[in-house]
Amino acid sequence: MDSLRLFVGQEFAGLLQRDDEGISFRYTDGYTGSPAFLNWPVQHLSRHWHDLPAELAGLLPEGLQLEQWQNSAATDRSDWGLLAATGADLPGVLSVLPNDLKVAPQGREAGELKGLRRARIRPESDALPYRESELATFNSLAGFTYSLASCGASASAVYSRKKSSFKLVKANGSYRLLLEPKDSPAAVENQLLTSRLARDAGLAVATVGRVQTSDGVAVLWAERFDRSGASNSQRLRLESCCQLLGQAAAGKYDGSVEAVAQLIRHYCTNPKIQLMRLFHRVLFGWLTGNGTLHLKKWSLLQNGSIVELSPAYGLINSELLGSSTPESALLIDDRCDGLNRDNLLEYLGREVCGLNTRTIARVMDQLEAVAWERRILESGLSKRSQRTYFELLGERWRRLH
């Protein structure tokens, strides 16, 4: 039987065990700490599954990151093996450590933090002293000592203000570095522009920026908002809607905005405010052509006793990527395409989110006040992509009026 120790911050919560019948977890007797996951109440002491449950599997890399793991020299290429290899440095507040080694978890569960942001950094474009190949292969060379729970080629890093540059690290990074995909040129500029527009529109957004490798490939850096304090010692609970629904990452598009709203009502401590933020973010994502806001891009963040929507991340105009995506990654009123004022303002805003006329009007005012044209013209997108962005915005605005 294999076993792993599961910690919530510094607190030992219980043992994960794997045998021929599957995987089980049991809270340790007398445990009074926070639940491992919001949908794993401590009162229900034990659980059993045939395979690694979605809550834990959702912490693991997928896509290209998973391919690197499977092609590495790892002896156990299963999800269990990947969890054992990366469990010391997972997203959020959990650590999963070997049972036969007395290793302590790095971070502790954060108390109430008044500010989650680090001191602002303004890296120059040459603040990444690595070649593209070094960044793309870093995970496999590092032995996968951490998990970024992402699809593309990405690495963990810290930023040295003394040297004004990023440094790749095997564990405990403060930033994610994401290489621009070869089949999606200008994707980094696209994400940077869309994140700036979202911030202008009044949304809480993950802090991002652009640098490039020493051989000229664009890289998006993104701040880790699930960590804070000296040496990233304070960890915040971060759970995606995939995890909260017990849904595998492969089914991240199989859901609805209504289901996200239900999770907000069930878990958030200020659901009325969070439902307004849900409506605001869905509307912005639809206006900017983001057909990739699936269940893994909706997460809840816990700061002390407060559970709320995490800052928005993965913001991009997918219409510019050259691939066909729906208007909405998740169903709204049983549809993903052909959305209009009735579906978005009347149904989603009033019926699903319970917003009144004044609140809906305030969100619309925030969106209309954005300097869309100036931001897009100032961006590094090509003239053709800028024109496509303008045309999409114009067409979507017409449907709302």
Image (tube, grey):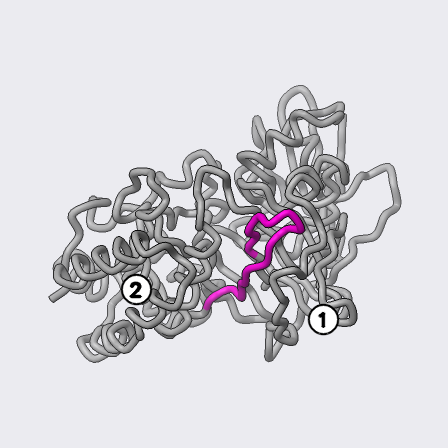
Residue at figure coordinates x 60%, y 33% from the top left: 66
Which amino acid type is marked by label 1? Gly
**In the foreground, 380 or 389:** 380
Furthest-top residue in this view: 20
Tag count: 2
- Helix, strand or loop status at disc 1: loop
Residue at (50% x, 46% y) in the render: 243
- Kindly identify the residue that appears in the image at 53 percent across and 39 percent down: 54
User: Measured along the vertical axis of the image, is residue 164 above or below residue 381?
Assistant: below
Reading the image, the residue beneath label 2 is 279
Residue at 17% from the left image edge and 52% from the top image edge: 339
User: Which residues are the magenta region?
Assistant: 205-220
Q: Which amino acid does label 2 sit on?
A: Phe
Question: Residue 67 or 332: which is nearer the viewer?
Answer: 67
Q: In which quarter of the image is residue 100?
A: top right
Q: Do the residues labelled 1 and 2 touch (CB within 8 Å)?
A: no
The residue at which mark 1 appears reads as 229
Q: Percent from the top left, x then y, of residue 255?
A: 34, 43
Q: Does residue 241 appear in the picture of this structure? A: no
The correct choice, above or below, for 69 with respect to 134 in the image is: above
Residue 242, position in %: x, y? 46, 45
Seen in the image, is 32 located left or right of residue 257? right
Q: Residue 223's spot in the image, x, y percent?
A: 60, 62
328 or 298: nearer the eye?
A: 328
For label 2, count other residues whose C-alpha is less than 10 Å away and answer few (under 14), some (14-19) or many (20+). many
Q: Residue 396: x, y in percent?
A: 19, 58
Residue 126 included in the magenta stretch of the image: no
